[in-house]
Every structure is written in C-alpha cells, then in structure tokens.
Amino acid sequence: MARFTLPRDLYHGTGALEALKTFKGERAILCVGGGSMKRHGFLDKAVSYLKEAGMVVELFEGIEADPSVETVMRGAEVMMKFNPDWIIAMGGGSPIDAAKAMWIKYEYPNITFEEMCKVFGIPALRNKARFCAISSTSGTATEVTAFSIITDYSKGIKYPIADFEITPDVAIVDPALAETMPKKLVAHTGMDAMTHSVEAYVSTAHCDFTDPLALHSIKMIQSDLVKSYNGDMACRDSMHNAQCLAGMAFSNALLGIVHSMAHKTGAAFADYGAHIIHGAANAIYLPKVIAFNAKNETAAMRYAKIADFMGLGGETVAEKVKLLIAYLRKMNDDLNIPQCIKAYGSDSYPCENGFVPEEVFLKRLHDIAVNAIGDACTGSNPRQPSVEEMEKLLKCCFDDTEVDF
Ligand SMILES: NC(=O)c1ccc[n+]([C@@H]2O[C@H](COP(=O)([O-])OP(=O)(O)OC[C@H]3O[C@@H](n4cnc5c(N)ncnc54)[C@H](O)[C@@H]3O)[C@@H](O)[C@H]2O)c1
Ligand SMILES: [Zn+2]
C-alpha cells in the first residue's frame, strides 16, 4: 500500500492571501523570518485579514535562515503560553519549516528533537491547532510537503523531519509574495524545484499520482525559470505554481542522490567562508547524477521520457539523456550558476578559483561520500552507489569531468 497526501485546501493566484479572512478560529500565531514579509507589507496584511476573521493574533518574528533546534524550542514555548488554534507560517522554507517543528513540540511538550526526527514517527497532530503555510520563495514547496529541515548547530548537521502529519492543512500560494525575490534567490530556488521534479520522476517510489505533477512542473520550469530570472513577472508568478507542483510530486515520490549530495556538501566547507547553497548545489550535481543513474536502464528510459516531454529531440535513449544533460547545463549558464564546485565562488557565482580548496575537498571526500550514502534521500534513488562510486561522482562534481562509470 502506498500513500499520497496533500494539504486539504490550496488557495492560489494573486490575492490568495485574502483567504485568511475566511479562517475559523480564536487565536492565530503568525510565524515569520527575518523581515522581508514585514518590509514588503505582507505581514501587516496577514494580521489584518486574521483580525477580520475575528482572531486574536500573536507574532513570532525573526526566524533565521536554516533554523536551529533552539529557535524551534523557543517558538514552541511561546505557543504553549498563547495556546493558538491556528499556526500560520509565512515566508521562505526556513520560517515555515521551523513553525512545523514548533507545532509538533506545542502538541507534545515532552517530545525531544531526536524523537521528532524518527522518519514517519510523529504522533497525531491537530489536537490543539491546525497549520497554514504561505510561501514567499519558489523552490522548497514546504507549503505542501511532509518535510521540515532543522539544523543542529552543535553537531553542524541538518536533520530532516519527515511525516505526513506535518503536511500543512492549508497552503496559500500567492505569487505576489514571490515577486520581491532577488535574482539569485530566483535562480537557486528555481533549480531546486527542477531537481525536485526530475528526482521525483525517476525515484523508485514514483507512482501514477506523482508522475503527472513531476512532468508538468518540469515543462513549466523549462519555459518560465530563465525568463523569471530575467525579470518577467508573469513567468515569476507561474514559477510559484510550478515549484508547488514539484513539491506535491516529491513529497509523495521522495528524492534521490542529488539531494543526498547537496545535504552533505552544503555546510561541509563552512570553515572556508561559505555554504554551497542548496539550490546551487542541486543545479551543479543534477547533470552528473543523471549521467550516473542512466546506467540503470529503467532510469535512462525515464530521463528520455522527460527529454521527450520537454521537446529536446534525439533518436535513441542515450541521445535523449545527453540532450537533457546539455539542456540543464545551459540553464545553469543562463542563471549564472557554476558547473562545478571548483568554480563556485563564496558569493555563489562562477569564478576561476572557488572557495573550496582542492586539497581540502580531497581530504574530506571520503567522509562526505559515506554521509551522502547514509542520507535519507539515497534509498529512493534509482541506482545505489557504492562509497567508491559516490567518491568518484563527487570528484566529477568538483572538477566538472564526465561521468563514465
Ligand atoms: N521542507 C522542505 O521540504 C524543504 C525542501 C528544501 C529545502 N528546505 C529548507 O528550506 C530552507 C531554505 O528555504 P528558502 O530557499 O525558501 O529560503 P529561506 O527561507 O532560508 O530565505 C532565504 C532568504 O530570502 C529572504 N526572502 C524570502 N522570501 C523573500 C521574498 N519574497 N523577497 C525577498 N526576500 C525573501 C529571507 O528573508 C532570507 O533572507 C533551508 O533550511 C532548506 O534546508 C526545506
Ligand atoms: Zn531541494
């Protein structure tokens, strides 16, 4: 038996934020990040809509990017005092993910962070509050997914919380919130969404319910992402829907080793002054992983189907896979994303000498490969790599060399 879970309601289109006026409840806590929602006036609007719905509103502001366990515990404390029957999270993936974890702790005050991280081990929520997510970035799709990513800074590791219990009750996908994203955020979150769709389509857990979502979102991202990056606001709006469809696909079909590698390399060189940003890491690794996975016949056929759906041409399966890889690399060029770690500057743009020194990379390579194989996303990848293969693959991602194994 398989399960397919999405929010009960999804309000979309310009002005969808106004759906808050129709919510039934007494007390809403509104969780936001560092200030972009306030600066652009969306926080005030959300507060006034909730008040119009007759609710008392409390704010929890300042949730940091890549939220910490401490922030989650602090937010849960505030919830325990305020006793909300609605938790409303608005912003990028960070505040929404943090609020999801606060929700668990609010409902079960004795639960530990370790217990929350047991995959599909969360007890039934919705005894105290329901959850609404309003996304302002176009990539993570956490407004519709069963995931929350929280960082334990004492260990320097990102932990995924995964359970359909934390799939929000309501998602609001209002493109107006995404229009203020800076270009770099558009590029990175957009390629994150493309990776979600492609990995979901070839995942061993894909099904008839996830395939159409994955394919349609790929087509939309193909037609809209680069234009959105270059300032086309109609395409920016369309990307907000596309990433959400991609999220519906991967929340139910899971992901693959592009994400395993991105999770384990992201902060691995933080001591050299930067992170390899999630979406950029995915964009760099995706073409390499396609070449690796395509040695598996079923995966190759499915990549060829993606290429056909995108109208890329080619006669044989092998040709179609090559054309897909070339297309994704061209997207990286158009979005000013480097093709390899060696060329990844500390500002995330392509440069001659990236911020990760080669000798440091080689020294840490084995441990990163072991960690990547142990990542929760590896299990649903269509080809299971050995540690040696994962090391070779990561090396190709460092140097931008061809994957021929
Ligand atoms: N839950 C999931 O399924 C899932 C999937 C992928 C990634 N993640 C996690 O999500 C987090 C990243 O989320 P993100 O990429 O959405 O970014 P984010 O929430 O970390 O925000 C990044 C920056 O962009 C700003 N910002 C957000 N929206 C904006 C807007 N509309 N205009 C201007 N500035 C804006 C924020 O203030 C912040 O400074 C990471 O912690 C990652 O691990 C979660
Ligand atoms: Zn992702």
Image (cartoon, rainbow, N blue to C red):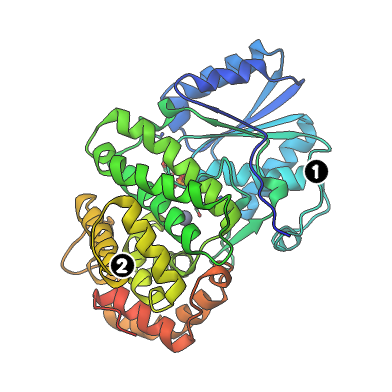
Give the residue at the far bottom of this rendering.
Answer: 388
Nearer the observer, 38 or 390: 390
Residue under numbered circle 1: 107
What residue type is disc 1 on?
Answer: Glu
- The residue where tag 2 is placed is 321
Question: In x, y percent, where is residue 127?
Answer: 84, 38
Q: Is residue 88 visible?
A: yes
Residue 331 at x, y percent in the picture: 25, 53
Closer to the camera, 143 or 303? 303
**Residue drawn at x 45%, y 53% as measured from the top left:** 197
Q: Quadrant of residue 102?
A: top right
Q: Name which residue lies at 49% across and 66% down.
A: 256
Query: For residue 76, what is the image quadrant?
Result: top right
Mark 1 close to ligand 1, CB under 8 Å: no
The one of 56 and 202 positioned closer to us in this rendering: 202
Q: Earlier in the sequence, mark 1 or mark 2?
A: 1
Of the 4 image quadrants, the one containing the C terminus is bottom left
Identify the residue at image location x=22%, y=38%.
Answer: 230
Quarter the N terminus occupies:
bottom right
- At mark 1, the secondary structure is helix
Q: Amino acid at mark 2?
A: Val
Furthest-left residue in this view: 352
Where residue 289 appears, as percent x and y from the top left, is 38, 71
Is there any visible trace of residue 274 in the rendered image?
A: no
Q: What is the secondary structure assignment of the residue under circle 2?
A: helix
Left or right placement of residue 373 versus residue 265 in this view = right
